Image (cartoon, rainbow, N blue to C red):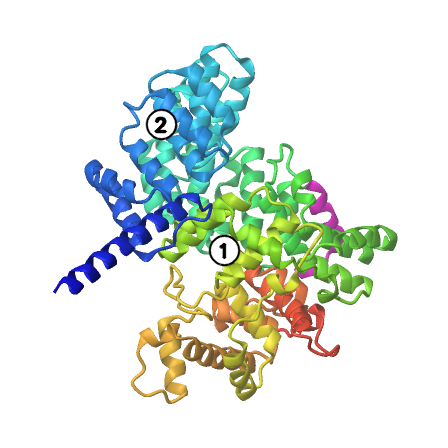
Amino acid sequence: MFSLYLYAMIKFLTNIIFLFYACTLAASQTIPSNLSGLDSDFIAARKAFQQGNATQLADYAKRLNHHALAPYVEYYQLRMYLRSTSIETIQAFLARHENSLVAERLRIDWLRLLANNQQWNLFENEFEKLANKDSELLCYAYQHRVKTHDNNALNEARLLWFTANSMPDSCTPVFNTLISRKIITVEDMWARIRLALEAGQTGMARYISRSIPVDEALNIDELNAAAQNPLYYLKTRQGKIKTRADREIALFALLRLLSNDTNPALVKWLEIKDKLSDSDQSYFLGRLGYRAAMRHDSRALGWFQAAQNTQNPHPLTDTLLAWQVRAALRLERWDSVLDSIHRMSATEQADSTWQYWKARALKKTGNVSGANSILISLSKEHNYYGQLAKEELGAILTATKESTPVSKEEVIAMEKMPGVQRTLAFYRLDLRTEAYREWVWTIRNFNDRQLLAAAEVARQHGHYDRAINTANRTIQQHDFRLRFPTPHRETLRPILKEQAIDEAWVYGLIRQESRFLTDVTSSAGAKGLMQLMPDTAKWVARQLGIVNFQQNLVTQIDINLKLGTYYLKHVLSTLDNQPLLASAAYNAGPGRAKRWRDNDKNLEGAIYAETIPFSETRDYVKKVLKNSVYYANVLEHDHTAPTLKDRLGVVSKK
C-alpha cells in the first residue's frame, strides 16, 4: 500500500516537474507552440470575440500567450473595448507589433474611431503610418485637410468623385464641400451620372441628380422607363429629346439595347443621332465600336474611327482603345494597331500586351529595328508576351538553367519568421482567408532571396498556391521549379499515358485552374484540381463507366485527374486537336471557342487569343499555354517540345 502511494507521489511530482519545464521552455522559445489543444483554444477565443463574450475571451487569452496567433487574441481583446482603451495601451500594442498585419488592422479600427471623435492630431499622425489607405480613411483625412484650408486636398479629393460606384459615407462631407465651392461642377455631376448609367447603376445616377437644379435634373420616371424597356422608350421618345437630361437617358437606353445586340441599337441610333451633340455622338460611337469588337463584328473599327472624327470627339478610355487594337488585329490593320496604342495612356502603353503588339505592328509596317528594340526588352520578362517576344527574336527558352534555389538554412530561417508562423497556424486551423491575408502582408516587401525562401516553405507545407504566387514575384533571381511545381506526378503520369495527352499542357492547365489545391471549390461550383463542374463530372463519369458516381468523389486526386483529363482530351479531339481552342473550351465551353473563330479566314492563334471577348478566358488561355512551355522545360521534355507559337497555332475559319 505504501509503495503504491509512494509511486503515485513520485509520478505526480514528475508530472509537475515536466509541466514546469515545458512551460519554461515554451516561454523561452521564439517559435510558438503548435499543440492541437492550444489551436482549439484559439478557435474558441476567436468565437468568443465574434460573440462579444469578453469573459471567455480573457480566459482563453491566458492560455495562448505563447501561441503563434497570440497577437490576434490580444487584438480581439483591444477591439472589444477600443472606445474605452487608453491611447497609451493602443500605441504600446502598435509599437510591440510594428509592421505586422494585426497592427495594421488595429490602426484602421482606431483611425475610424479617432475620425468620428474628431481627434484629428492623433488621426493625422497614425494615418501617415498606415500602409493601405482605403477610400473611407482617405476621405476622413480629406475632411480634416479641407477644414485646415489645404487647397491641394480639394483637388486631390475631386479625383475620387469620378466613379460609377457609391463611395463611403466619410466622403459625403468632402464632396458637399467641393460642390458648395464649385470645385465639383454641374458638368462633373453629369460626368458621374454617365459613368453610373453606363455601369447600370441607376440608383447612383438618381442620387447624383439630386445635386443638379431641379429643372435640369433627370426625370426619374423617364429613367425608369428607359431601364425597363429601352426599345419602347426610344420608339416613343425619339421626338422629345431636348434637354441634357433627355440626351443622357436616351444614351442610357441605347447602351441597354447595345448590351444585348448590335443591330437594334444601331437602328435606333440612326433615328435619334441628330438630336445629340457631337460629343454625345462620339461617346456612343465609341461604345458601339467596343461592343461590336467584342462580338468580332468587322464594322467595329469603322465605328471607332468615326468616334474620333466628330467635331468634338469624346475621349476613348484605355479599355475602349484596347478593343480598338483588337478589332484592328482581327482585320490585320497594322497601321490602326499602332495608332490605337499611341492613343492610350502612358501607363497602358507600357503594359507588356501593347508593347508586344506595337512591336509586331512596327515589324509589319517596315520598322524592324524599332520592333526588335521593343522585343529585346520584352523578352527578359517571364510571362506570355515575354515568351512570344523571345520566339519572335528566334531565342530558345532556357528556364531551368536560370533557376537559383535557396539553401536549407534560408528556408529554416524563413519558417521561423513570426508572419510565416502565423500564416501556417491559420492554415493549420483551416482559416484560409486569414492565412492568405497574413501571407500577402508578410511577403510584401521581401527581396528575391526572401521570396524564394518563403515560396519553398509554402511548397514544403503543401500550400502550392502560395508557393507559386510568391515565386512569381521575383525580379532577378528565379526558381522555376517553385513557379511550376509538379505535385501528384506519380498519379498523373499513367492517366496521361492512357489518354495520350501532353503532360506539360495538363500541368499548365491545373496550375491555372486550382494552383494544385485539391479541395478548392469555385464560386460557380467547379471542384478539385481540374475544377470540374458537377454536370461535366457526371457526364465524364458516365463515359468512363464509373458505377455509383457521387459528386463528393470529384475532390479525390485520382478521380479528379481521370475525369478532367478525359474531358480535356474530348474537347481537344473535337476542336481540331488545337490546345488553344481546347483551353478556351475548357474554361468557357466548346460552343464559344468555336464562335470566336473568324468567319472568312484562318486566324493567327495569338490574335485569336488576344481577341477572346471574356477577360477571364483571355487571361486563362494565355497563362495555360505559357505555363505549358515552362512545364515542358521544368519536366525536362526533349527539345522537340512545341514552342508557344506552335501551341497557339493557326485557327481555321468557321
Q: Name the quarter where the C terminus is drawn.
A: bottom right
The residue under the point 34% across, 31% down is: 219
Q: Which mark is residue 361?
A: none
Q: Name the quarter where the N terminus is drawn.
A: bottom left
Question: What range of the chain is rendered magenta?
Answer: 329-343
- x%, y% of residue 380? 75, 54
Image-quadrant location for residue 58: top left
Residue for badge 1: 263
- Residue type at mark 2: give it: Asp
Residue for badge 2: 169
- Residue type at mark 1: give it: Asn
- x%, y% of residue 309? 66, 40
Please identify the residue farthest to the left as the structure is shown. Answer: 1
Q: Nearer the viewer, residue 228 or 405?
A: 405
- Vertical relation: 233 (above or below) 505: above
Crowding at dot 2, Cα within 10 Å, few <14 / some 14-19 / many 20+, comes out as few
The residue under the point 36% across, 87% down is: 546
Q: Nearer the N terminus, badge 1 or badge 2?
A: 2
The residue under the point 79% across, 55% down is: 375
